[in-house]
Image (cartoon, helix red, strand yellow):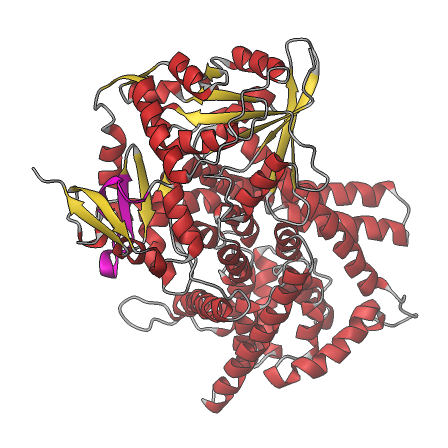
Amino acid sequence: MNSPRHAALVGNPNAGKSALFNALTGARQRIANYPGVTVERKSGRLVLPNGQAIELTDLPGSYGLDATSPDEEVTRKVIMGTLGGEAVPDVLVIVLDASNLEQHLVFAQEVIALGRPTVVALNMLDLAERDGLVIDAGVLENELGVPVIPTVAVRRKGLDALVTAIAGANSAQPAVNHAHVSQTERRLSAHAMAAAAILSETTRHRMHARMDRLLLHPWLGPLILVALLFVVFQAVFAGAAPFVDGLNAGIATLADTVRSALPPSLLRDLLTDGVISGVGSVIVFLPQILILFFFLLALEASGYMARAAFLMDRLMSGVGLSGRSFIPLLSSFACAVPGIMATRSITDPKDRLTTILIAPMMTCSARLPVYAVIIGAFIPARNVGWGIGLQGLVLLALYGAGIVGAMLVALLLRRSVTKGDASGFIMELPKYQLPRAKDLLLGLWQRAWIFLRRAGTIIFTVTVALWLLLNFPRAAEGENQIDASFAGHIANGLAVVVKPIGFNRDIALSLIPAMAAREVAVSSLATTYAVDAGHAADAGGDETTDHQLSGQLAKHWSLPTALAFLAWFVFAPQCMSTIAVTRRETNGWKWPAFMLLYLFALAYIFAGITYWSAIALGL
Amino acid sequence: MTLDSLPLGQKAQITAVDWSVLVAEEAQRLQALGLDVGAWVSVAHRGIFAGRDPLAITIGRMTVALRRVHARAMHVEVAAL
């Protein structure tokens, strides 16, 4: 018998393909991108009954071989063997949702007609039974002419039979019908086949309809959505705090250990101040990212995500996006990194790119330390009436500015850079399902790994580069290291550029290390002014330092400068994790470069407008 | 009558589709989901904001979300009782 070497799972979206893939390959999965596109390539090891291991790939869900999205294009090319560098699968495993046969058999027939070794997994039989369907797999097998194996992926039922069928499929060539069959004919025969295979059908599938009636209710639906989002954000901010503190402490301990273990040298400083604190400042985002993704994956797996998109579509269509952009943008209020990673659920590539490009304008948690220090120093804690504080009002205005900016930019982008037909919003609302812990954990682990490895390599490089800029050339005796460094010289040049928007040289200098992450601006300013005041204060972010810093800032900056600084951080893309993730998700440097440019331009303009308006108003 | 004006829950059959008003990709996607001449459909839900856009359409055992512009291109006939 000729054993296969590669097999691929194909099927409609929502056929339970991923669950089946996870059940067949376990945690032994590799995730990458297909060459040249940002479509995720998932592959894993599948062990056949004879002990031989083959590669199983999980092809993107597809409604047919006529591709309408990049995902479907990849599926078509892999099946046809026209995707360079990609092995042609020896066996195609078609995954059918047993409770949606009439729909899924259309694509199945199209794939079987190719005449390649094929096995059908009649999946999610348990859900079909719950819906009151009794299905005869034998009838389907006769009609389709290929082995049909009933499976319940989430309960590992039928997996052995499926693997045996995959192993044996290579030698059995199905009879090929080369006659051209139209989509309509396939639809008709799918209808006939489904009717023949469904032995009995009772209308017990009321559960989904009832849940939709509640969750898509004109005013209960949005209320539930808001409540759910509140819980998610509460968990992200409150739940992540102890872990972030723990990580910060761990990073500090590690730096101290290295500092005491090594003799004083430049290499030691590079390790402690450069690598450990730099990479550390990025890793502290991990708890937030993981908690956020836990909820996002659960919402996706349960089928609720599609409902949220449905509820928010009208709102998003106003700026040329669709409901699918809502959740990624919302996630970006916690952190743009998971937000940008979550754009993978947006099928339209132009919608997706637009969403990625505007995501950094959502006010993320890293801006809060910056806002807190500046607002605390310059905005009086005055009541403006009705119990509304002026400080809170300014913070709200900063959030609002980001949202309005993002919407305007989305409108502009959809008319220029990401121009194209309105992407529309046509999307299947999948059945509700209880998410499975194992699939969630696997998904979480994969996201964490992507962030740490892919973003990590770039972040490491940038961190070291920043450290070199700040530490070379070495200062002469009695000279300030920062002033002598490349960064100091860059700051001198930068100071000229940012002078028109009210920034002094100290601010220009703080903006350079803040490229790592926005909140670094705070510790960097603290260092600068602590030196000025003759304090040997550490550049930590604890409250006394913040308090001291606020006092120093109020002495050195005018109010228009402070307001311009706030305005700057609404837009400035000063977060290398975001840039690194954008590079990964758009597969190149073109879009992150574009993002950097337009966001810096916006930051400059908006800070300038704020500065001169404040001066004109006599503030 | 077009699909966008079909009352909630009312079953109807698609009798004609004006494909020319739809973008090719959208038309293809609608067809792939089975929204084509002859299909039996009903409107299950409408959106929450102005215009009650988008619509959730029940077709077979599937629920499909689409916008009013798509629904307006589909002519439907209510089952004669």
Please identify the residue farthest to the top as the structure is shown.
A50
Front-most of A543 and A104? A104
Where's residue A429, x and y in %? 35, 40
Is residue B36 found inside the magenta-colored segment of the image? Answer: yes
- Left or right side of A197 for A93: right
The verdict on residue A414 being magenta is no
**Whether residue A479 is visible:** yes
Residue drawn at (15%, 48%) of the image: B7
Residue located at (54% from left, 60% from top): A360
Dividing the picture into quadrants, the one containing residue A434 is top left
Q: Is residue A104 left or right of residue A65?
A: left
Query: What residue span does the magenta drawing correspond to?
Result: B35-58
A433 up-or-down from A291: above or below = above
Q: Residue furthest front?
A: A179
Residue A326 visible in the current orientation: no
Image quarter (top left, top right, bottom left or bottom right) of the N terminus of chain A: top right
Locate residue A288, reporting x and y percent: 53, 44
* Residue under the point 37% across and 60% down: A317
Quadrant of the rendered image containing residue A289: top right
Query: x%, y% of residue A99?
Result: 34, 25
